Image (spheres, rainbow, N blue to C red):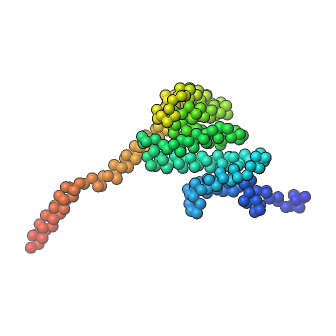
Amino acid sequence: RAEEAGVVAVPSALHASCFDQPSNTLVLEAFLALAHLGGAPPLLTEEACLLVVARCVADARLQHRKATYQKCVWAALRARSQLLMMLHGKEEEAGGSGGGGHSPAARRQCIQLSALLGNCGLHPSPKLRELQMKVFQLGVTLCPSSSEALYHLGNGQLAQYEATGDAKWLEEAELSFRASLAVEGGAVNARAVPEQVQQQQWWKEQEQKKKKAASVAASSAKTQQGPSSVGPAGGRASAAAKQTTSAGAQAKRG
């Protein structure tokens, strides 16, 4: 009847009365959009992501709404991933990768998120596989000797092969599973990178980016040090030369 009368039905998620309901997935997407803006006041990036996660777990009744529940789970996974990437970025800026390793909190969160992504129950999609690979690869970067992290990476690569049919993914999945078996029972926090991981293309590209960034940073540091390379002795000699030149000029005038 509404269509016959020319009235457009508004989805219930857009009703003002449903704004504060956990089932309103548009609010979750709005929080994530704010997080991607860089955390401009009054809502910080971390707060926006935490709000998404909190809203998704606030109402257990969402489990009875399959479509809405999956949207909320997808939003929560993206928010957790955003928080993890922010933590990793902060540690990189603070020199976390330079010998001291990353914090246990980052490694723990990455392993937990990897487990959630591997068993989230969402329908397979390119976006989900992309997010999985991003987190799984970060897990191996943070914990290269973790059998669990390598296992998650192998599962993600195997899913990519099943979806695309690209033999490259199958080869890398085999390497990851072999690496997972090789490090099983060893120290999880060891920084040694298994040979099977070093043979993978994504790892080689990551190492090349790190070397390039280090080279650019070194060149920038040298450029900034150039103008200030004159030492105290050079500065005094220059000042003395200026005084001598000034005295000579005054003598000529006299």
The residue lying at 12 percent from left, 67 percent from top is 247
Residue 33 appears in view: no
In the image shown, does 109 or 221 lie closer to the viewer?
109
The residue lying at 62 percent from left, 53 percent from top is 50
Please state the horizontal and vertical placement of residue 57, each as a whole percent of the image.
69, 50
Q: Residue furthest bottom?
A: 254
Please state the horizontal and vertical placement of residue 66, each as a whole percent of the image.
77, 45
Left or right side of 88 for 4:
right
Picture quadrant where residue 107 is located: top right
As drawn, 207 above or below 40? above
As drawn, 198 above or below 231? above
Picture quadrant where residue 98 is located: top left
The residue lying at 71 percent from left, 55 percent from top is 26
Label total for image: 0
Picture quadrant where residue 139 is located: top right
Please state the horizontal and vertical placement of residue 210, each as a whole percent of the image.
45, 41
The residue lying at 59 percent from left, 49 percent from top is 82
Q: Quadrant of the C terminus?
A: bottom left
Please state the horizontal and vertical placement of residue 87, each as a whole percent of the image.
53, 48
Q: Quadrant of the N terminus?
A: bottom right
Left or right side of 252 for 148:
right
Residue 70 appears in view: yes
Left or right side of 104 for 18:
right
